[in-house]
């Protein structure tokens, strides 16, 4: 029965992995054909070329700084968790979201050059509204939002089922299980049950800080998207297309980097929860032979849930790596686009 449940869990998680991969490809894949790219949309003219190169150069620098700051802050929290024993691993749980918040703050606050282009041409203003979700597919925003809601719901559920340890902290999982037995005349008698505790479990001790840090991450993402969308348009209509492309790349970087941090956080918590639940839902089988090693039997449905959480953690961890690579790829595109306009425009002028 236990092996059958395990196979069902593996099959369900495999289907989930395929669905998640398809959604990530659709959400964070290449932009739609009608969306302009930085190199193709650059207008001819020295002023437009210079403004475009300056904008892409500043954006690539800001994205690189954001990645470095985010990784540095996350690494610092991991180092604190390794040395601060009384934290019981809490800095590990907060590393992803706090690092992402720090990186997004650096990315948003770094100054960008204005789109000022010299000349006596007419100044054009765009009146169409621009919001935080105007420059990417809706899947780019829906997937991380659903993941954040699932994380909060899971932490609330884990908090309800958590118990206090010897220090009064809600960080263990308790379950009534077999604690011992006696033998008499070659038979098992006097089977005893008791409460067993396993940890660290993401109860309220870990759940409340992680929920707060996740809410801060969502707020930081919205703030970064809002600033990116509401920044002033160029004064020249010739630069509108390249400005739209640049905002699209900013949006994809913000969402890919923040989603990677969120996915790493979910994967870590799911792996720890699954490991604790799996250990808790294995009962010892009583034996009358004092020299035999007692076997174990899985207790359902907790054992299957534990396996599903462990496999889900592996899937989400792979998705986190993919999203991190996507954010680095956006930095590469920004760096390449800052050099492409001059070559493209020189070739166009030579024709």
Image: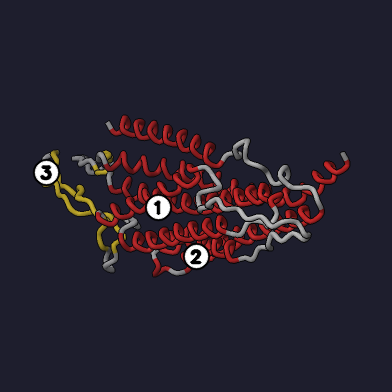
Please identify, in this view, whether the residue under mark 3 or under mark 1 is nearer the observer.
1
Q: Residue at x 31, y 58 (%)?
A: 203
Q: Residue tagged by mark 3?
A: 189
Left or right placement of residue 141 versus residue 115 in this view: left
The local crowd at label 2, few if under 14, some if 14 to 19, many if 20 or more residues have their Cα within 10 Å, is many
Question: Which sits in the foreground, 213 or 272?
Answer: 213
Q: Residue tagged by mark 2?
A: 77
Q: Residue at x 53, y 66 (%)?
A: 76
Q: Which quarter of the figure has residue 109?
A: bottom right
256 to 103, vertically: above or below: above
Q: In the drawing, what numbered circle is on residue 203?
A: none
Label 2 close to label 1 by CB (< 8 Å) = no
Label 3 close to label 1 by CB (< 8 Å) = no
Residue 246 image offset from top left, x and y in percent: 64, 51
Left or right placement of residue 174 versus residue 255 in this view: left
Please identify, in this view, whether the residue under mark 2 or under mark 3 is nearer the observer.
2
- Helix, strand or loop at label 3? It is strand
212 to 28, vertically: above or below: below
Q: N-terminal of the two: label 2 or label 3?
A: 2
Q: Residue at x 48, y 51 (%)?
A: 264
Residue 138 image offset from top left, x and y in percent: 48, 43
- Residue 292 seen in the figure: no
139 to 233, vertically: above or below: above
Q: Which quarter of the figure has residue 172?
A: bottom left
Question: Which sits in the foreground, 120 or 55?
Answer: 120
Q: N-terminal of the two: label 2 or label 1?
A: 2
Q: Residue tagged by mark 1?
A: 269
What is the C-alpha distance between the residues marked 2 and 3? Answer: 51 Å
């Amino acid at each position: 029965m236990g092996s059958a449940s395990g196979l069902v869990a593996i099959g369900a998680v495999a289907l989930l992995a395929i669905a998640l991969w398809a959604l990530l490809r659709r959400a964070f894949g290449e932009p739609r054909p009608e969306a302009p790219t930085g190199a193709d949309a650059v207008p001819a003219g020295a002023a437009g070329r210079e403004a475009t190169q300056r904008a892409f150069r500043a954006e690539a620098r800001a994205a690189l700084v954001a990645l470095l700051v985010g990784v540095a802050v996350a690494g610092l929290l991991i180092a604190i968790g390794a040395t601060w024993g009384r934290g019981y691993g809490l800095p590990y749980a907060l590393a992803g979201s706090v690092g992402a918040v720090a990186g997004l703050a650096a990315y948003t606050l770094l100054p960008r050059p204005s789109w000022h282009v010299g000349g006596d041409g007419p100044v054009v203003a765009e009146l169409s509204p621009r919001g935080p979700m105007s420059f990417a597919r809706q899947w780019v925003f829906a997937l991380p939002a659903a993941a954040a809601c699932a994380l909060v719901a899971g932490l609330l559920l884990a908090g309800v089922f958590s118990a206090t340890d010897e220090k009064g902290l809600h960080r263990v999982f308790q379950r009534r299980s077999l604690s011992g037995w006696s033998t008499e005349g070659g038979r098992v008698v006097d089977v005893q049950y008791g409460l067993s505790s396993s940890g660290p479990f993401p109860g309220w001790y870990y759940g409340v800080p992680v929920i707060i840090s996740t809410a801060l991450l969502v707020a930081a993402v919205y703030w970064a998207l809002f600033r990116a969308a509401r920044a002033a348009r160029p004064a020249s209509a010739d630069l509108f297309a390249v400005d739209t492309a640049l905002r699209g790349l900013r949006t994809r970087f913000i969402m890919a980097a923040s989603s990677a941090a969120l996915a790493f956080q979910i994967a870590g918590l799911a792996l720890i929860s699954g490991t604790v639940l799996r250990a808790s839902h294995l009962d010892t089988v009583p034996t009358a032979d004092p020299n035999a090693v007692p076997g174990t039997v899985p207790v359902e449905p907790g054992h299957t849930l534990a396996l599903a959480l462990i496999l889900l953690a592996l899937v989400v961890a792979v998705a986190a790596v993919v999203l991190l690579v996507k954010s680095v790829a956006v930095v590469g595109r920004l760096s390449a686009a800052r050099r492409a306009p001059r070559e493209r425009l020189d070739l166009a002028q030579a024709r």
